């Protein structure tokens, strides 16, 4: 049995045809849309990229590069200048702080209690042989002051020396009182010199001076007391010498000395006075009569304290006075040759009195334009009470209501112009 295979034939209906046509049209539409999109993307992308500038591909010109380098160099130089300016400010501040510190240290070293530590009392060895010199050494030791035993230009003399680092260079250059002689030990000698003389040595000095005066300036003998003093002072021209004559009787020093001089040399007490005046005025030598070594010690201690106070005192005197204000009136009132300004001077003089205002002074000067007129008015008054109340009824015109000068101010003006006692208290 044989079977025959026949192909199956499908019939396509109209509805299927429509479906196939619709699907085909959809496919055709979708395909054309995709192709257009891809084509559009492919076409537009390169055009956008060409229109957009690229920073990687942009190149700068040489001028721009040089300008950027120049700006960078300027910024670097500005930073370095700023850093250098700050460093200079720091150094200037350090210098100012150092100067203030040194000034404070220098001022502190010039105070008497500190300056006293750099002073040394130099004592001649010959004085140690005199009875009573241990009083001087014991007093200096008790005060913890420095002293040294060394040979002096004048026998039986005492001098003072100070350390150089304790004193500013300006004192060494400008003041002859502080820079007189300098040695290799870093000290400088002060200008004070004290010599201790016995009564017999002083009488020899008086005789030498008297002989020199009588012979009209004859040079003294070198081995005499006056000759030794003269030679010693020639070496240091700025020295101020003081002679301490030790006497046992303090009550009749000058009288006893005059009698001794008269009995020994045939002179008079007036000759001793003449010699003392001559030594002080011509030789700049001062003579003091002391009673033993206790007064010698007191004199040496007084000179030492005076030397310790002198640098600080001189420094304060050289500085400006804090109460002197600046202004056009600081130099006073100008008076012309024709007398213009004298009335203002008269008004200023009255204002110097306590509790006297400018209006009160103007009232007084208006009534009496000069001090002479006021003095004449005082002279014309009959009694002292009338003189004191002469200015009391003068009217003072101020910003407020009128008032009178008053009896108190009137009395003070009267005392100021007529009193002969310079220490009289006006109030």
Image (tube, rainbow, N blue to C red):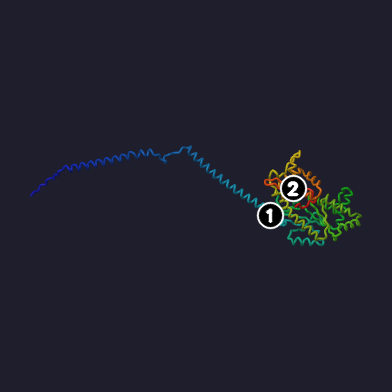
Calculate the distance from the C-alpha at mark 1 to the C-alpha at mark 2: 57 Å
Residue named by callout 1: 108
Query: Could you tell me residue 283's position as x and y percent?
Result: 83, 50
Q: Is residue 286 visible?
A: yes
Residue named by callout 2: 393
Query: Could you tell me residue 366's position as x and y percent?
Result: 74, 43
Q: Which numbered tag is attached to residue 136?
A: none
32 left or right of 151?
left
361 left or right of 291?
left
Q: Residue at x 54, y 43 (%)?
A: 78
Hey, which quadrant is residue 111 in on the image? bottom right
406 or 22, nearer to the observer: 406
Query: Could you tell me residue 13's position as x and y percent?
Result: 16, 43
Q: Residue at x 85, y 54 (%)?
A: 225
Q: SS of the residue at dot 1?
A: helix
Give the answer, above or below, for where 328 lies relative to 274: above
Of callouts 1 and 2, the N-terminal one: 1
Q: Residue at x 74, y 62 (%)?
A: 142
Q: SS of the residue at dot 2?
A: loop
2 left or right of 231?
left
135 or 400, nearer to the observer: 400
Give neighbour class at mark 2: few <14, some 14-19, many 20+ (Cα, 10 Å). Answer: few
């Amino acid at each position: 049995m044989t079977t025959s295979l026949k192909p199956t034939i499908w019939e396509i209906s109209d509805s299927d045809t429509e479906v196939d046509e619709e699907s085909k049209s959809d496919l055709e539409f979708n395909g054309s849309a995709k192709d257009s999109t891809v084509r559009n993307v492919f076409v537009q992308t390169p055009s956008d990229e060409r229109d957009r500038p690229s920073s990687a591909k942009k190149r700068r010109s040489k001028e721009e590069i040089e300008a950027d380098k120049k700006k960078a160099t300027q910024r670097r130089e500005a930073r370095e200048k700023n850093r250098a300016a700050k460093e200079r400010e720091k150094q200037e501040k350090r210098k100012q702080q150092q100067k203030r510190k040194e000034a404070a240290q220098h001022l502190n070293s010039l105070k008497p209690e500190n300056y006293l530590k750099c002073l040394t009392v130099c004592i001649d060895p010959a004085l140690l042989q005199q009875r009573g010199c241990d009083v001087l050494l014991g007093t200096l030791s008790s005060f913890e002051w420095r002293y040294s035993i060394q040979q002096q230009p004048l026998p039986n003399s005492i001098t003072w020396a100070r350390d150089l680092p304790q004193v500013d260079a300006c004192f060494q250059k400008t003041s002859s009182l502080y820079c007189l002689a300098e040695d290799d030990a870093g000290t400088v000698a002060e200008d004070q010199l004290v010599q201790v003389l016995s009564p017999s040595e002083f009488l020899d000095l008086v005789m030498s001076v008297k002989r020199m005066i009588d012979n009209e300036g004859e040079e003294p003998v070198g081995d005499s007391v006056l000759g030794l003093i003269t030679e010693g002072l020639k070496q240091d021209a700025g020295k101020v010498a003081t002679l301490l004559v030790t006497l046992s009787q303090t009550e009749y020093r000058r009288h006893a000395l005059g009698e001794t001089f008269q009995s020994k040399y045939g002179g008079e007490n007036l000759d001793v006075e003449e010699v003392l005046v001559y030594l002080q005025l011509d030789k700049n030598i001062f003579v003091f009569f002391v009673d033993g070594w206790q007064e010698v010690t007191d004199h040496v201690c007084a000179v030492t304290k005076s030397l310790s106070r002198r640098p600080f005192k001189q420094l304060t005197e050289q500085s400006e006075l804090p109460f002197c204000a600046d202004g056009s009136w600081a130099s006073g009132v100008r008076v012309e040759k024709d007398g213009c300004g004298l009335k203002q001077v008269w008004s200023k003089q009255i204002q110097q009195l306590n509790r006297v205002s400018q209006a009160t002074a103007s009232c007084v000067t208006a009534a009496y334009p000069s001090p002479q007129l006021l003095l004449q008015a005082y002279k014309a008054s009959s009694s002292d009470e009338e003189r004191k109340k002469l200015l009391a009824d003068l009217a003072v015109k101020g910003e407020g209501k009128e008032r009178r000068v008053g009896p108190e101010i009137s009395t003070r003006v009267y005392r100021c112009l007529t009193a002969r006692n310079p220490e009289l208290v006006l109030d």
